[in-house]
Amino acid sequence: MEKNDLAVTEMRPYMSNRNLLVIAVLSGIGGVMSTYIGYLANLFNSMLGVPFGAGQFLSGLHVLWIILAAGLVKKTGAASIAGLLKGCIEFFTGGTHGITIIVVSLVQGIIVDLVLVVFRRYTLTGLSLAGGLAAVSNVLVFQLLYFSGVAWGYIAFIAFLAFVSGIVFAGAFGCHVLNIITGAKVFHYDHQNEDLSSPAPARNSRLKITVTGIIFLFFIGGAGYYFTQVYIPPWSGPKCAVEGAVEHPLEFCLPDFDEQKTTIRAELKGLYTHVDEKEYTGVPVSKILEKAGPRAGSTVLKVSGYDGYTIEFALDKVMADDRFILIEEEGMLRLVAANYEGSCWVRQVNMMVIE
């Protein structure tokens, strides 16, 4: 009987079904919430007038779910699995970075695992360092893939923002959430099947629990608004609306204007990015606006992406510009403004407003 018991113990899987379920649930929530957090980050960039970077202040919130999965499962590799699943879910729910986000999220999970292996215990210091380094890794991955030519001083600055965000929102906040769960004894740990020591016990005051609850409710409420009022599912196809001072407000898909398609050559010259001259095929915005019928006296065209980024153009110049086109790229609409600088090439276009 003892031999049979020993055999059963030795054959116990590395991760239990409960562990895998916890990872799956947190990865699912994290993947969906990260799509919303990406939207918030782009709003932050828009408010400060930069195409990217400032939103790294929120990057720790992407890592939070990986930290929670690692802290609840307490098995080496849990963070990596959570990162991979989270990236896949974010990709399939229409994340703004495309398939690259799977690599970014997986790297974040691997870094969290490596740091926790070194610390061997879920301390505030260990979790904060894991969160900070994981958040920084997304800056480095995007630098390798997209930001060629960007000044290293700027990269260092946004990496610092990401590191601080990772410490605060992923590490410190994540450790606090884990302590609340541990103190409330709502999660049962299998002490015979864990690699790392449990978090040190912490006293959870009613104020801490209340503040934590308010923060989660704030993000859940914001995410609810985003997914019901702003979000466009990737499977529905990219659409755009023309509103404001027009005779015929319209919502359209680019194939609606296939007969007006044209091909131009353009070079993206941005302050932080550069794309060599190449061909773009799309529909002149002037043809779309003609169908909407701008009202007399209208002078401004505002083009917005669903991430909140907005640029204004002089309407008369747009109507006379045959190199100002809307194209479909990677399942989204993009403005190619050949006669303007790179910051005017709006991505994920979903709204054009005439004033």
Image: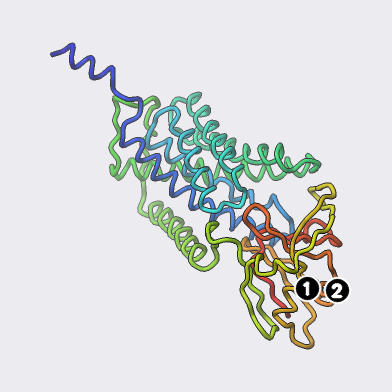
| Mark 2 crowdedness (10 Å alpha carbons): few <14, some 14-19, many ≥20 | few
**Helix, strand or loop at disc 2?**
loop
| 134 left or right of 183 in image | right
Q: Which residue is mark 2?
A: 320
Pick the front one: 83 or 188: 83
Residue located at (57% from left, 37% from top): 134
Q: Which mark is residue 286?
A: 1
Q: Examine the image and state in which quarter residue 154 appears.
A: top right
Q: Which mark is residue 338?
A: none
Pick the front one: 171 or 223: 223
Instruction: Return the x and y of residue 210 as percentages of the image width and height.
Output: 39, 56
Q: Are marks 1 and 2 in contact (CB under 8 Å)?
A: yes
Residue located at (74% from left, 56% from top): 50
With respect to residue 150, does 339 lie above or below? below
With respect to residue 117, does 33 lie above or below? below
| 176 left or right of 331 in image | left
Instruction: Return the x and y of residue 178 as percentages of the image width and height.
Output: 39, 41
Residue located at (61% from left, 42% from top): 100
Q: Examine the image and state in which quarter residue 46 appears.
A: bottom right
What is the CA distance from the residue labelled 1 to the residue labelled 2? 7 Å
Instruction: Return the x and y of residue 260 as percentages of the image width and height.
Output: 75, 69
- Location of the N terminus (image quadrant): top left
| 285 left or right of 17 in image | right
